[in-house]
Image (tube, rainbow, N blue to C red):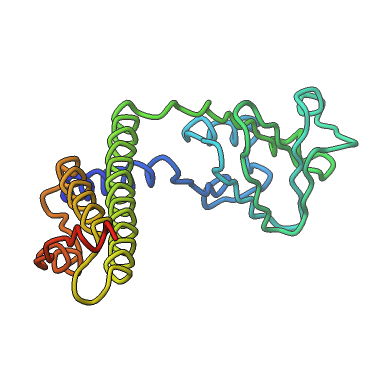
């Protein structure tokens, strides 16, 4: 069982790493975020179309004496925005893509957007977990539940036997040092029957009773003195 759990854990974490892997994109590559040298207002859209963007990926805008704005589609088309959703002009701006859909970016410097310093980013919808990942999760859950239940069962059995042992020792102590009373003898018989019944229910071969219980059970009990009991 342990080797199976180990394999499943490795597979789960490997798939988890793939699922949460995020990428930082340097907008425009080596050229960065700058007005295109040629008259090409689709330069950055061409760059964006060559990449696949996912939720939690980030865009890094590197520029000099410029700015970057996230705007609405209408503002993007007009190359004009008075209330951008995002604005930065520190020369090294990072933007996190936190939801699927379209993002519209443009320069905040007058005339730069009209000259092609603008871009549309499309973020893909998150994919559903692969079927194999669901199987791994189900297998792991089953293994951990079984292990937890076995530990719980062993703990409850040990607690029950410990309580029975304490009561047995109390009964033997009250019965006198020479010979136990009839009640103590009956209690011992019941305790032994309870132990045997518990052992039959316990299917785990490796589990065993505490040695101190075994020693008590192995002690030879004296014959009950019915005369003393009647008195």
Q: Quadrant of residue 176?
A: bottom left
Instruction: Give percent across and percent down for residue 30.
Output: 52, 52
Query: Closest to the observer: 47 or 115?
Result: 47
Q: Quadrant of residue 167?
A: bottom left
Task: In the displayed orientation, state which residue is furthest to the right.
Answer: 82
Task: In the displayed orientation, state which residue is furthest to the bottom.
Answer: 177
Residue beneath the point at 59% across and 35% down? 43
Residue beneath the point at 71% across and 36% down? 105
Where 52 sits versus 22, above or below? Answer: above
Instruction: Give percent across and percent down for residue 200.
Output: 14, 42
Instruction: Give percent across and percent down for residue 193.
Output: 18, 46
Image quarter hosting the C terminus: bottom left
Query: Closest to the observer: 142 or 175?
Result: 175
Instruction: Give percent across and percent down for residue 87.
Output: 79, 46
Q: Is 190 on the left-hand or right-hand side of 124?
A: left
Where 48 sits versus 213, above or below? Answer: above
Total count of labels: 0
Query: Closest to the observer: 148 or 81?
Result: 148
Where 225 sits versus 30, above or below? Answer: below
Q: Quadrant of residue 143?
A: top left
Where 43 sits versus 149, above or below? Answer: above
Residue beneath the point at 27% across and 67% down? 172
Q: Is 57 on the left-hand or right-hand side of 168?
A: right
């Amino acid at each position: 069982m342990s080797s199976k759990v180990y394999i499943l854990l490795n597979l789960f974490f490997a798939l988890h790493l793939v699922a949460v892997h995020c990428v930082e994109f340097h907008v425009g590559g080596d050229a960065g975020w700058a007005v295109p040298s040629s008259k090409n207002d689709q330069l950055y859209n061409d760059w964006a179309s060559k990449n696949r963007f996912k939720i939690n990926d980030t865009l890094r805008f590197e520029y000099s004496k410029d700015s970057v704005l996230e705007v609405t589609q209408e503002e993007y088309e007009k190359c004009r925005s008075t209330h951008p959703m995002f604005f930065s002009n520190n020369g090294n701006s990072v933007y996190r893509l936190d939801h699927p859909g379209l993002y519209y970016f443009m320069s905040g410097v007058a005339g730069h957007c009209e000259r092609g310093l603008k871009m549309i980013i499309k973020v893909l919808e998150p994919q559903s977990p692969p079927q194999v990942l669901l199987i791994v999760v189900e297998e792991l859950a089953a293994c951990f539940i079984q292990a937890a239940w076995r530990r719980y069962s062993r703990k409850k059995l040990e607690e029950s036997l410990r309580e029975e042992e304490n009561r047995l020792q109390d009964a033997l102590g009250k019965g006198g040092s020479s010979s136990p009373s009839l009640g103590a003898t009956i209690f011992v018989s019941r305790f032994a029957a309870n132990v045997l019944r518990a052992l039959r229910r316990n299917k785990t071969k490796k589990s065993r009773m505490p040695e101190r219980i075994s020693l008590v059970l192995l002690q030879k009990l004296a014959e009950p003195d019915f005369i003393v009991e009647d008195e």
